[in-house]
Image (spheres, helix red, strand yellow):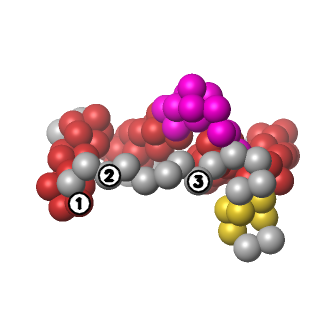
Amino acid sequence: MSVLEELAAERRRQDEKWGEQNHPDGTGTGTEVVPLWYAEDFAEWAKHATDVAARASVVTWREILLEEVAEAFDESDLDKLRTELVQVAAVATQWVEAIDRRRAEPPC
């Protein structure tokens, strides 16, 4: 089963369990993400952490995904928020595909 098929199946399970969900976004400048962190500060920190790791050639999926999530948390414009969330989903999908590739590689 492809990762996109797995995602579709998971969405069906979520809908079956919870029904249609319509929560507030909870994003935008000044939104508290975790205690003492605000969305704008969190996004800047995440971008910086990813840049530092990339320059040192030690960037991981964790930094990349965290940066995308932080950027989404910081966005209040619905069109831009949607774009950021698509980027979050794309990075998470890439990460799963990378795990699947590692599993498929023959041991050295």
Residue 93, compared with residue 37, is above or below; it is above
Mark 1, secondary structure of its residue: helix
Observer-nearest residue: 62 or 84?
A: 84
Q: Which amino acid type is marked by label 2? A: Gln
Reply above or below: 96 against 82. below
Left or right, residue 91 beside residue 54: left
Of 58 and 96, which appears nearest the observer?
Answer: 96
Secondary structure predominantly adopted by residues drawn in magenta: helix
Relative to 34, is 49 above or below?
above
Residue 21: which disc? 2
Decide whether residue 19 is among the magenta residues. no
Look at the numbered disc 3 and give the secondary structure of its residue: loop
For disc 1, the neighbor class at 10 Å (few under 14, some 14 to 19, many from 20) is few
Q: Magenta residues? A: 74-87
Q: Is residue 86 visible?
A: yes
Residue found at the very far left of the displayed protein = 16
What residue is shown with label 1?
Answer: 18
Residue 24 image position (x, y, % from top left) = 49, 52
Callout 2: 10 Å neighbours few (<14), some, many (20+)?
Answer: few
